[in-house]
Image: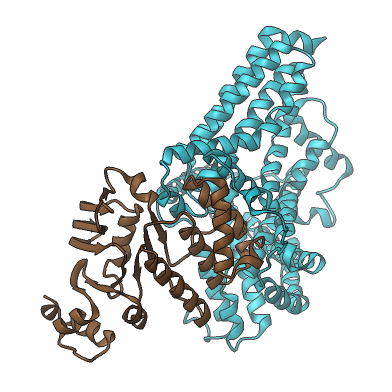
Amino acid sequence: MTDSALRIRGLAKSFDKPVIRDLDLDIAAGQLYALLGPNGAGKTTTLRMVAGLAVPDAGSIEIFGIDTTRDPLGAKAITAWLPDEAMLYDKLTPLEYLAFVAGLWRMDPAHAAAEADRLLQWLDLWDQRDTRCEGFSRGMKQKVALAGALIHDPRLLILDEPLTGLDATMARLVKDALRAQVDAGKTVIITTHILEVAERMADRIGIIAGGRLLAEGTLQDLRDRAGTEGMTLEDTFIRLTSTPAVAA
Amino acid sequence: MSLARPGSFAWLALHELRLALRARPTRGKTRWIGYLLVGAWLVIGCLAGWALRNREIPVPPDALIGVLAVSTLALSFMTAQAMIGSQRTLYESGDLALLLSAPISGRSVLLAKLLGIAATIALTYAVLLLPIVLPVAILGHPRLFGLVALLLALALVAASLGLALTLVIAALVGPRAARTVGQVAAAVLGGALFLFTQVLPHGDGLSSTFTTVFERLRATGIGTSGLSGLPGHAGFGDPLAIAVLLGLGLAAFAGAGVTLERAFLSGYLDGGARFSRARPTGRASSRLFHPGLTRTVFAKEWRLLARDPALAFQIVLRLIYLAPLVLGLLGGRHAVPVPAALAFASVLIASQLVGSFAWLTVSAEDAPDLLQVAPVARATIDRAKLLAAFAMAAPFALILPIAIASQTLPGAAITLAMTVLGGAAAGYVELRLGKPGKRGAFNRRRSGSLVAGIVSLLIALVFGGGAAALVFLVGGGMAGAE
C-alpha cells in the first residue's frame, strides 16, 4: 500500500502543439488538492489522462500505486471523474442513472440501491429521483453526476470545475460533499477558476502553466515563494503565473 | 453584409442566407465526395448542353405530367424538410433569443428565418438540378431557366407550409409533445406520397407502380392544362406560368409573415420551457439495480429508445420503406415464391433493425466519457451494447421466420439462421465503421460514413439473397407455387 494517491512522472502530451511537458506531480492520500492555472494551462488535459480519457505521449501515472497504463481497469475501479459538463442521459431519471453507473462499476445491486437512496437524500434529490434529467437545471444535473461519482465509493475523486454555474446553495452543498469525502479519508482533486474556493478548501495547491508545474504546496508555501505574505491566493497566483522566474 | 443597412430585414435575410450556405460539410471525406459528385454531374450537364445546343427540345404532354409528378413529390419532401427546419429554428438553434432581444421586429425575424429555411431547401435540390439545367439553358435553351423559378417557388411554398404545420401541431398538442409529434408528422409527410403509390393496385412489380400513377394522370388529363399544368408549363419557360407560381410562392411567404408572427413567438417561448415527467413511483429503488453488465446496458438502452417515440418511429418508417422491394419480389411476371421472398425480407428487416439499434447504442452514446472512465473494457461494453441491439430487434426479426414455418420448417430454420447472421453482420459493421453522432441525427448517420452504408447494404443483399436461394432450394419454392 502507498500513501500517495496520485503520482505522475515525466508526463507529456501534444495535440497540435505540446500541451503537457515533462510534468511531475505527487498528491498524498486524504487531501483536497486544487490544481490551478490560466486557461489552456493543461489542467484538464492532465486530469483527463489521469481518468483514462486521454493517452499520454510519455510518462507514467499511478493511482494508489496502480499504473494506469498497465492496469487501467484497476485504476478506474477506484477513481471517479466529474467533468464540468455532467455526463448524464437526459431521458433517464437520477435513480436509473445511478443504477447504470452502479452496473458499470459492477456493484452489488442491494448495496448499490441502498447507497443510491442515501446519496439522493443527502444531495437533496430524493423528490426528483423518478424525474427525467432533461428538465433539470445545471446545478441539479451536477448533483446527479456527483451522486454517480460517489456511488461506487472511489478512493480518488477528480472534479473539473465542479462549482461553475452553481448558485450559492448548490455550491455550498457540493463543497460540503467534497469536504466530507476528504474527512472520510478519500482524496479529492479539483480544478477551479474560483480562487477563493481553492484558498478556503484546498489542503495543497498546484499551479500549472504552459504544461508545466510552476509551483506547489500549501497556500503559505506559495505565498512564501511569490513574496506575497498576507495577500490573497489571487495575488499569489497572478504573481506566480505572470512572473515564471518567481515560481522557479 | 454591407449590402444592407444593419438591423434591416435585408441585412437579417443575408445573415440567414449565409448560415444556410454554410450548413454543409466543410471538412473530411464527405465534402470531397460531394464536390466530386457535383463536378461529375456538371460535366454531364455541360456535355448534354453541348449535344443539345442546336436541337429543339420537344415538350410533349408526358413531360408536363412528369414535371407535375416530380414537383408534387418534391413538395412533400420539401415540406417535411421545412418542418424539421422549423423545429430546429424554434427549439434548438438558440439564436432566436439573441434575435428577439435585439431591436428588430418579430415579423422581420420570422421572415428572415423563413427565408433561411427556404434557402436551405432550395440549395438541397439545386445541387441536383442546376449542374444539369444551367449548362443546357445557357447553351441555347433559356426557357429551361423556368425550372430554376419552379424550384424557388416550391421552396418558398414548402417553407411557409412547413412552418405553418409545425405551429399548428404546437398549438394542438402543446409544447411538451410538439417536438415529438412534429418529427413524426414530418416523417409521415416525407414518405406519404411514396407509400401512397405502393398501395395503388398494380400487377407487374415495382417498376409498374410508377407507370400506374403516370397512366392515371395521363388518362385524367391532369398535369397538362389548367392549374395542374402550371408546374410543367413554368418548368419549360412559359412566362405566365412562371409569374403565377413565383407569385404564389411569394404570397405564401408574405402570408406566413403576416399570419404566423404571433404563433411563431409563442411557439418559441413555449418551446423554451423544459419539461420533465415527474412521476414518483413510490416503489423500492432496488428494482432498478441489476447484476450483470449486459442487463444493465440493456435496461438503459431500452429506456432511452422507449422514451424517444420520434426516434422509434423513424426506425419503424425505415421498415415501411422496405415494403416496395418485397412487394416487387412477390408480384409481376418474375415473382419469387412467397417463402423465399419472406426469407429475403426477414434478413433485410433484421439487418436494418440491428444496424439502426447498434448505431444508437454504440455510436450515439450520450455519455461516452462515462463509459471510458468506468472499469470495464471497451470490448465488453461494445459486446453488451450489441447484445442489447440484438435483443431489441429480436421480436420483429422473429415474425417472418414464424410465418415461413407454416409452409416449410426447414425454410424457417434457414431463414432464422440467416436472419441472425445478417443481423450480427450489420451490427458488427456499425461497431467497426459507424461514425459517432447524436441520437437526433439518426437519419443523417450515413452522411459521415458512406463506407458503412455501402457495406451494410451489401450484407443485407448477400445474406438476404442467400437466405432466399436456400429456402427456395429446400422446398420453399414448391410451397409457394402450390
What percent of the width, then of the height, locates residue B146?
Answer: 66, 58
Total number of numbered discs in the rendering: 0
Q: Nearer the viewer, residue A129 or B36?
A: A129
Q: Residue at x 87, y 39 (%)?
A: B219
Is residue B223 left or right of B183 when viewed as pictured? right
Q: Say whether residue B353 is visible.
A: yes
Q: Residue furthest bottom?
A: A230
What percent of the width, then of the height, locates residue B228?
Answer: 82, 54
Eyeballing the image, is A141 above or below B429? below
Q: Residue furthest right?
A: B220
Is residue A194 left or right of B10 when viewed as pictured? left
Q: Nearer the viewer, residue B291 or B380?
A: B291
Is residue B83 left or right of B173 when viewed as pictured? left
Q: Nearer the viewer, residue B301 or B25?
A: B301
Colour given to chain B in the rendered image? cyan
Indicate the colouring scheme: by chain
Rendered image quadrant of residue B194: top right
Rendered image quadrant of residue B463: top right
Q: Say whether residue B237 is visible.
A: no
Which quadrant is home to the C terminus of chain A?
bottom left
Q: Residue at x 80, y 42 (%)?
A: B196
Eyeballing the image, is A165 above or below A49? below
Colour given to chain A in the rendered image? brown
Eyeballing the image, is B406 above or below B26? above
What percent of the width, then of the height, locates residue B474?
Answer: 68, 7
Rendered image quadrant of residue A8: bottom left
Q: Nearer the viewer, residue B55 or B6?
A: B6
Is residue B179 left or right of A62 when viewed as pictured? right
What percent of the width, then of the height, locates residue B423?
Answer: 58, 29
Eyeballing the image, is B471 above or below A6? above
